[in-house]
Amino acid sequence: MDLDEVDLGSINSFAVRVVHFAECVAEAHKMGHGPGPHGRPWKIGFQRQAVSVYAETFPSAYLRGIADTSRRTALLMDGAEVEKSTGASWGIVTEFLRSTADALAENPQLAAVAPEAGRSDLASSATGLVRYERFAQLLSEDGICRLRDAASTVAGYCQARLAVAPTAQELEWIISVAVNEPI
């Protein structure tokens, strides 16, 4: 399936967030937290333990929004055809999103929240302080680096395919250069 700009934008948004998450966990490692035993943070085993950290920080409606949006984005990624060089990274990020959604869905507090209830909260500012040191205690340094690299690859893939229209000012400059007029 070919991805349109909205799909690529959604996937890119999550990939950038995963990169940020991984960088913050890596920084927590540098500050002496962890490392933990999980070498594959995209697997359900890690996510099941991570749910308690998420639940300490975010309200249930917000987490429900994360679960629903993660699942939708993973479904988009499942059906997409990507270049072979991006395939392994794409698979890791897809599995990270799917296992996040699955682990959150297993949480009894979230089961009581209506689907899509937290969707509007996702656009709001951060609702709490994420405890990256707690994630660092769960994750190995190699595992978080692999996740960061995979998410960076996916973000780069999406960004390279997103059409970026020039602004009016940039268009004027391009035309000036093309016709040899001074700017």
Image (cartoon, rainbow, N blue to C red):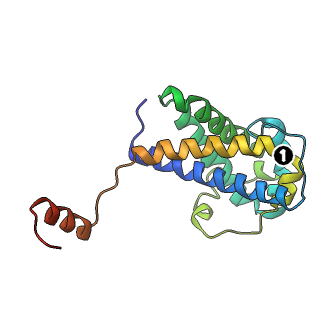
What x and y, as percent, mark residue 46?
83, 41
Identify the secondary structure beneath mark 1: loop
Q: In this image, 151 relative to 12: left or right? A: right
Residue displayed at 47% across by 44% down = 158
> Badge 1: few (under 14), some or many (20 or more) residues near its Cα, within 10 Å?
many
Residue displayed at 26% across by 66% down = 170
Whether residue 137 is visible, yes or no, is yes
Identify whether 4 is placed above or below 30.
above
Q: Point out the residue furthest to the bottom here.
A: 183
**Pick the front one: 132 or 182:** 182
Identify whether 39 is placed above or below 167.
above
Quadrant where the C terminus is found in the figure: bottom left
Q: In this image, 147 relative to 25: left or right? A: left
Q: Amino acid at mark 1?
A: Leu
Which residue, given by chain and number where applicable, does mark 1 sit on? Answer: 139
Identify whether 112 is placed above or below 74.
below
Q: In this image, 12 relative to 141: left or right? A: left
What x and y, as percent, mark residue 147?
70, 42
In the rendered image, which quarter is residue 24 located in? bottom right
Quadrant where the N terminus is found in the figure: top left
Whether residue 106 is visible, yes or no, is no
Residue displayed at 66% across by 56% down = 20
